[in-house]
Amino acid sequence: MASLRELFSPRDMSEGMPWRRIVEFSVPMLIGNIAQQLYNTVDSIVVGKYVGDNALAAVGSAGPIMNLLLVFFVGISTGAGIMVSQYFGAKDRERLSATVGNCITLTIISSVIVMVIGPLIARPLLSLMNTPESIIGWCTDYLVIFFLGSAGFVFYNMFSGILRGLGDSFSALAFLLLATVLNIGLDVWFVAGFQMGVAGVALATVISQIISAIFCLVKLLKMREIFDLSRKYLAPYKEYISRIMRLGLPSGITQAIFSLAMVVVQSLTNSFGEMFIACNVIIMRIDGFAMMPNFTFGQAMTTYTGQNVGAGRIDRIRQGTRQGAAIAVGTAVVLVALILIFGKYLMMAFTDTPELIDMSVYMIRILAVGYIAMAVSQVYSGVMRGAGDTVTPMWISLITTVVLRIPIAYGLAYLTRSEVNVNGRPESIFISLLVCWVLGAIITVFFYHRGKWRRKAAETFAVFPSGEAVAQENASKTSDESHTN
């Protein structure tokens, strides 16, 4: 039995049974991902119960725009996690310190940009998406508050990415659970108590995210035995920022492509009216929980692969991939069964409207089998990213979400138009998503076996400045500036 201190410490995944290391890392991260999903889910439940179905639709319609403007930070945290896992696996303290410091600097700069730009473009983007006039005001309020307080979201994701790269998934879990409990309490207090409506749930989310980011920062500051988080490592260094961007941007672009596709599809969704918009919100909230194990195992495989690449244990990666895929698929099968059996009760948590409940149950059944396909995609994509091949998963996402999903969604809607369904049948939205997931899994497995990720792993430790070299150069620059002044 591991001690409490060991649970909240970095974990070396280049030793021991692969499946055991993957599970030990995944379980707390899965709980944490579920807790993070509770932020949006509790928002939806509270506004749906206390304000109404239109408010529920407003929160959901804001989601694609919110995700679109925050994907850059997903990229930074992904690049950070990959580099941290590789240098931790290689036991390279200096490069690890420089990586963490440059990630923080890059995040500070970019988060300020989003806090300025986000509120300015929120309403124009909502108008472009044909958001109904009945909910566009609520959508705008939600987005403006979220973007003004987005630094908490950004820094939590970046800090937790660093912790995951070190193999410490327990610390991020503990801090996130605390913030989630606070978020639930504030949601009810602001909406039911102060009657703040949609703005109240946005404010509750922002406050909770800031608190979770602060706890993560305190944890990192205490990990001096692993790396240094001093001022000299915060100065930007071209090679480190360049590599973070090269590794992270493909993942960010992947999320941007997905979010952009969601914005385009949201326009079609909005054409089906407020009832279907609210249905889509409920489905996406359930989908968020159903996808959590898949995303978790994908993240676990990225860290597992990165640490083994750093340690030179390429032989362990294939073994871990087979075991990780088996665990992920098995988990997905159980979840699909639960969704099919208990789907109606899940929908009843969001609304009391019978028509909306029945519509939501029908739509989630269309998607159900796709979660098994996504389990496969996430594991194999995670391995490729951990080895440094972040480009292949990016263009696979481009093909499936843009080249395939958007035309299929609009094409099915066009072909199913009738007097009853003037804009087509609304299930076109979810059928297109199912097709996208299944084809994505097939393509991802094919390119995993092609083996580009192995070549990327071999290139990882090419000529690259050490953390000490970064610190010395920055110190030299500071000295030169002092003499000049």
Image (spheres, helix red, strand yellow):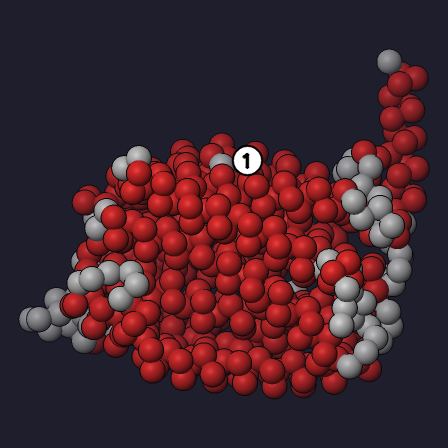
Find residue 315 and report its horizontal and vertical position in percent: 82, 82
- Residue 208 visible? The answer is yes
In the picture provided, is 131 more to the left or to the right than 119? Answer: left
Residue found at x 68% / y 51%: 245
Q: Give the answer, above or below, for where 442 lies relative to 251.
A: below
Residue found at x 92% / y 17%: 483
In the picture provided, is 364 more to the left or to the right than 148? Answer: left
Q: Quadrant of the N terminus?
A: bottom right
Q: Give the answer, above or below, for where 471 lies relative to 181.
A: above
Q: Which residue is mark 1?
A: 113
Q: How many marks?
A: 1
In the picture provided, is 227 more to the left or to the right than 348? Answer: right
Q: Quadrant of the C terminus?
A: top right
SS at mark 1 in the image: helix
Q: Give the answer, above or below, for where 148 lies relative to 37.
A: above
In the displayed orientation, state which residue is furthest to the left: 419
- Residue 393 visible? The answer is no
Question: Neighbour class for label 1 at 10 Å: few (<14), some, many (≥20)?
Answer: few
Which residue is nearer to you in this view: 141 or 185?
185
Which residue is nearer to you in this view: 26 or 232?
26
Q: Amino acid at mark 1?
A: Ile
Find residue 281 and report its horizontal and vertical position in percent: 32, 60
Residue found at x 48% / y 50%: 181
Residue 286: name its quadrant: bottom left
Find residue 247 and report its horizontal and vertical position in percent: 69, 58
Find residue 466 and report its horizontal and vertical position in percent: 90, 50
Residue found at x 35% / y 39%: 190
Which residue is nearer to you in this view: 281 or 455?
281
